[in-house]
Amino acid sequence: MRKIIAGMLFCGLLLCGCGEKPAPESSAETVPETTTAAATTATVSETEPEITSETVTTAPPEQLYMNRCEKQIVEVQPDEILERREDVVYPEFEKYYYYSHTACRRTGVNVLLPADYTDEKRYPVLYILHGSGDTEDWIAEDRVCVSVMLNNLITDGEAEEMIVVSPYIYCSKDMPECTGLDPENWRNFDRFAEDLMRDLRPFINSTFSVAEDRAHTAITGCSAGGRVSLTIGFTHPDVFGFTGAVCPASGVVREVGNPPYTLEPAQFCFPENRPYLLLISAAEHDEAVLDYPYQYHDMLTENGTQHLFHVMTQSGHDYHSVISHLYNFMRMIFRVSE
């Protein structure tokens, strides 16, 4: 059994859909719902370097920011953060449509605006990508608790106001949805990177009052969505200052899982524009993506790519893991100026 890790590593994402196995329904779970979710801080990796006064003085701001984020990680969110409060407003996701030139069709996207949204203010944006067995509607489901958890965190001063975007990430001109986990279907998911940069992000930025710089733009996803979010984070670090993935599927990097691959091992690093946060969350009971998140973690360590790696011991390839990951991720992003 691997130990829980949440280290700053230096060396040189829904039901999480199908992951690496087709799932006929997004309601399947691998573990029962936990009734007592203790907020247990993950242990620090033994590879973490000693932080000295000289390190603090000379370290780049991205490194210092991730050092700070590491201290915030808990394995499971507290139960009360998922409970509705009488004095908090919980807005709902709303469906919008934009034209995708990549898929050659009108495509739906769910958007959650802050409770007191106004055009007089510019907001950061978080993109959350679904898994292979789901659509843009998955993250908007009540059981995922995005609006409840986020607005409770905002009320408690633990998260920033933000716009949350849940897009449909399967981009094919010929097939409307995923039909299996073969190379053709994986490429259709990978094409979302083009769709995001060409059509979706411009649509979001022109429709809503958005702060467009990398310090105010984040992306994460689960399973197939985690594969895509990692790819986008590494290929567009000038746009996304915060990148996450929970139970990411294989294929982000050659040598991890089966083809097709999106990156070579040497590309699994940041020569410039290092992110403020790179968080990968793995579930100990995940039988869909197997050991792939650990392999990404090992390769990042070998490449000397600073990141956080968080293992959840109570969940599997399911929405419990997504909630725990988002609890950590949403508290960490968009706080560079603090």
Image: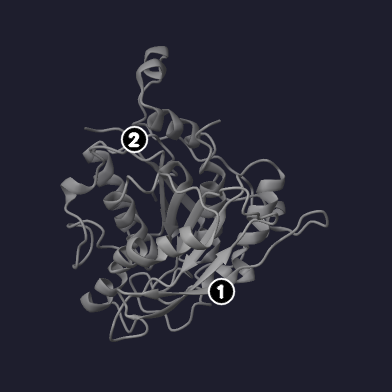
Q: Amino acid at mark 1?
A: Lys
Residues tagged 1 and 2 counted as in contact (Cβ below 8 A): no
Residue at the limit of the structure toward the top, as seen here? 54
Query: Quarter of the image containing the C terminus?
Result: top right
Q: Real-space Cα distance between discs 1 and 2?
A: 39 Å
> Tag 1's secondary structure?
strand
Q: Which mark is on residue 62?
A: none
Is the residue marked by circle 2 packed among few (<14), some (14-19), or many (20+) residues within 10 Å?
A: many
Q: Residue at x 20, y 56 (%)?
A: 263
Which of these two is toward me, 329 or 169?
A: 169
Left or right of 32 in this view: 44: left
Q: Position of residue 150 (x, y in %)?
A: 63, 53
First in residue order: circle 1 vs circle 2: 2
Displayed quadrant of residue 172:
bottom left
Count of numbered circles on the image: 2
Q: Position of residue 131 (x, y in %)?
A: 42, 70
> Tag 2's secondary structure?
loop
Q: How is the image coloured?
A: one colour
Which is in the foreground here, disc 1 or disc 2? Answer: 1
Q: Amino acid at mark 2?
A: Leu
Q: Which residue is mark 2?
A: 9
Left or right of 118 in this view: 111: left
Q: Residue at x 41, y 38 (%)?
A: 276
Q: Residue at x 45, y 50 (%)?
A: 218
Displayed quadrant of residue 185:
bottom left
Q: Position of residue 13 (x, y in %)?
A: 43, 60
Question: From the viewer's perspective, is residue 60 above or below residue 92?
Answer: above
Q: Which mark is on residue 95?
A: 1
Question: From the viewer's perspective, is residue 104 above or below residue 255?
Answer: below
